[in-house]
Amino acid sequence: MENLELYEHLLNLSSVKVEAVELTKDKVTISCKLSTSSCICPTCGQVSSQVHQSYKRIVRDLNLISREVYLSIKIRQFYCKTCTSYFTESLDFADANKSHTHRQEDFMFMVARKQSYSESAVILNVHPKTVERTVLSLCKERVDLAQRYAQVKRLGIDEQSHRKGKKDYLCVLTDLDRGTLVDILKSRKKEDLIAHFESLGSSFCEQITDVSCDYWRGYISVAQHCFPSATIVLDRFHVTNLLNSCVDKFRKLLRKSETDNLNYRRLKWILYKQYHNLSDKELINLQLCFEDCPLLKEVYWKREQFHHILDNNQKIEIVLQKIEEWVGSMNEELKNIFKSFTNTLNSTMEYVANYVKNSLSNAVTEGLNNLIRSIRRVAFGMPNFEHLRWRALAISN
Ligand SMILES: [Zn+2]
């Protein structure tokens, strides 16, 4: 096999004919041209073989054994006799205005998936801006946003704080049936969300059958306003969290008042678990605590009862009635302990109960939040919302 032929095989670009190769310590420059003798005129569709002029175009390709590879391609400009116009031949392996081949761009995208632009730039030996531009344009190319919105029926709405310690929230929209990210919005403000959903058109608003969100009042009123026929469900995850925070507040008091009791140590995570999920060791530990503090047992069982209501009933009217009974049966001590939970229940009971309709959970959103967090970590130094958004959307594709 001739040397040039070998390079053609290595390149594996069917339309390319290698004419010369120049090797240096860290660089391979492959001079080549397209093997076709004619080209189709983009204006009239006729074949032309009349070359008017040609020029050199340099495109970076994938590295070859630690050497950077550059294709120096002879690009021809043709003259079309039929419509008397000039046109330039295009490459099927690189876009007209780009200095990298498609496969080199794909590689850049892969490298930048889990690393920052600047780290990726060092690995690839290109400018960080090149990585940034390439990644962003590939993300936009790969994400069909309209399609994502078109297929969602059950919508999850949740938030993510954008910058640590700042009240700067992103709003995360998910497709609960598919378990996928739909979009990330820069603001979770009520009026911004309403404007966003309305901009998607009435057909979008009408296709939403269920909305799952957390306790934040803004989401509930957005859902009521934009999706009047949808069932609003308070996410079980957040309901459980609020319930557990009451139990935990009581545990902290207990721990403070009885610092000598070793059983109360490491009790937090045991208390968070539902009874059927406890290990034998945890059961023994819990039992000992119950013996030391009967009120703790009451608190724990009260919490369990609430879960039982949501887990063992299908009819919303029955659930509502049982929740009312659950609140009503508390003595003063328990009322005080569960105060923050029952206060919230007053205005949201219907949405909490809607959970039993189809056990809708926003757990997907919680998982996707982790993804966004990891992207935010690698986006460090580039706190640009649009980048965060498109990278998260592309990675969750
Ligand atoms: Zn023509």
Image (cartoon, grey):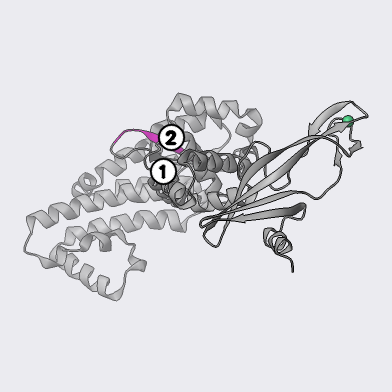
Distance, label 1 to label 2, CA atoms, is: 8 Å
x and y percentages locating residue 145 in the rendered image: 61, 39
Tag on residue 240?
none
- The residue nearer to you, when weighing 326 against 385, is 385
Quadrant assignment, res 42: top right
- The residue nearer to you, when weighing 238 against 119, is 119
Residue at 59% x, 43% y: name it.
Answer: 138
Q: Which residues are magenta?
A: 166-173
Q: Is residue 224 visible?
A: yes
x and y percentages locating residue 317 in the rendered image: 48, 45
Mark 2, other Cα within 10 Å: few <14 / some 14–19 / many ≥20: few
Q: Quadrant of the N terminus?
A: bottom right
Residue 60 higher or lower than 168, as above or below: below
Please name the amino acid that badge 2 sits on.
Asn
The residue tagged 1 is 379
Mark 1 touches mark 2? (CB < 8 Å): yes
Q: Is residue 286 left or right of residue 275?
A: left
The residue tagged 2 is 384
The single residue placed furthest to the left in the displayed view is 260
Please name the amino acid that badge 1 sits on.
Ala
Magenta span dominant secondary structure: strand
